[in-house]
Amino acid sequence: MNRILVIDDDKAVLNYFQVLLLQAERFEVEVLADSTKAFETIDAGRFDLLLLDMDMPGVTGKEVLQHVRQDHPGMEVVIITGVEDVELAVESMKMGAYDYLCKPVDDSRLLTTLDRALERSRLRGEIDKLRDQIGLEGLRHKEEFRGILTQDRKFLRTLRKVEQIAESDNNVLIWGESGTGKELVARAIHRIGRRRDKPFIAVNAGTFASELFASEFFGHDRGAFTGAARDKAGLFEEADGGILFLDEIGALDLPVQSKLLRVLQSGEYFRLGSTRERGADVRVIAATNKNLESEIEHGRFRRDLYYRLNISSIYLSPLRERRGDAELLAHHFLAKHGALNDKSIAGISDDVMSLLEAYDYPGNVRELENIIASAVVLENGRTLTRRSLPPYLVKAVTRAGLSVPREVRKTLDELEAEHIRIVLEHTGGNRTAAAAILGISRVGLLAKIRKYDIPVKPPGKGGGKPPPGDDPPGDDPP
């Protein structure tokens, strides 16, 4: 049962709430008339929700709310106020309260508000738990990947590869569709690597015309050309000792590619108007949404530059291939943009989630965030509904015939992998017993475990010997 604390200096009001909530038979209720004891009661009580009067002697409701938001951010707060204090109640919502109700309180509205507030708390708790359990699982530098959220195992393997590459000093080529997080990964490499205390300079390489490239990248001395009124350091000089991130590298003109190749080969360059040679101690990370091998075949990208940049390669898969991430990210963006817009939206309807999971996302994670940000602004209820989604998304999914419940859209592989996980949990990781239940050979089960990347705890985990007939951990055939 959810635990609710009611704080109000009026004992008649407390008695009313206590009787009403207990009669609902789904809450544990504690009441408090002395607001001076509010902090210690809240700190000791492990409550899920606080029903709070704002106008109290001693410690005010505003002070109690500030304490809750600071020390108990997971606790939902519903404000109870008189009609004359509505302005104060609105202010409390800006401070993080879920909603406010005016006295006398309508019974059914109160119960509905409490249920919705508790549902939002539950969803937020599930997201936090999911993020802790499988978000960035197995990474040694989780903090350095801030801004990236995933539960997809293939994408997690990519991030573990990023950690390894970051510790080298190789040039890196990051490729993938627009909106997959290429700059976020580049910044993670910088934070993890040995150049972390040096500059990180990010530029969109495709915006530089051929005639401006040398001046912008190598700098110029005063008087080098008309309008050069002072010395200017170029991007290579600004990034000295650190990292130069070149986004959209595939958009560079061929003459510019030649100039970039020259400095990468020699590690040296000249400012325009200068005869003094300068060294380029810079690690280059390039990113592109183009297929550079195809660009090479069509004569639009230099093969030798490609090999200079592609010493270490990182491919970022599109959102549509990252299993479960659309739902995880949608809830994350809902919380983010709900807070930015002072809106208390508890969750996402099943109908909307089915649409979000069925959509292809040509703009990937960036597009998903924009969709949620737009929907939050338009939604007037407590749950994101279909009417708040951009019409193009609904039309695209409906036209493709994919707007069906999530459980119906599972592939046979997904259903098989899910069933194997359930059976393995049932057998405590005993693969021989699991294979017998599934009606396949043990070798066949091991092949499917590898195919679906199913984590299996060692037999006998938690004490005792492995169950009879199962091999010790690590003895599986290749």
Image (cartoon, grey):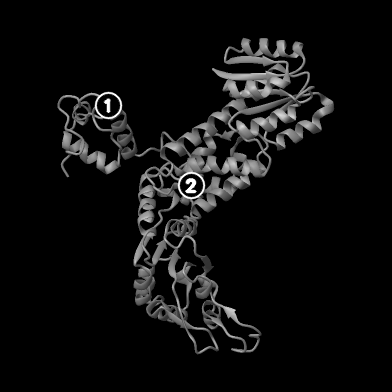
Residue 257 percent across, percent down from the top left = 44, 78
How crowded pointer 2 is (Cα within 10 Å; few <14, some 14-19, many 20+) is rated as many
Disc 1 to disc 2: CB gap under 8 Å: no
- Above or below for 142 versus 202: above
Note whether residue 392 is visible.
Answer: no
Which of the image's four quarters has the N terminus? top right
Above-or-below relation of 417 to 393:
above
User: What residue is at 63 percent from the left and 41 percent from the top?
Assistant: 338
Estimate the x, y position of residue 395 in percent, counting from the top left: 54, 47
* Residue 134, visible in the rendered structure: yes
Q: Amino acid at mark 1?
A: Gly
In the foreground, 312 or 142 = 142
Image quadrant in which you'd find residue 259: bottom left
> In screen coordinates, is 74 left or right of 268?
right
Image point (40%, 75%), residue name: 301
Say what secondary structure mark 2 lies in.
Answer: loop
Left or right of residue 220: residue 292: left
Residue at screen point 51% across, 75% down: 237
Residue at the spot of label 1: 428
Residue at image mark 2: 359
Q: Position of residue 310 (x, y in %)?
A: 36, 68
Quarter in which the C terminus is drawn: top left
x and y, in percent, of residue 425 in the image: 30, 28
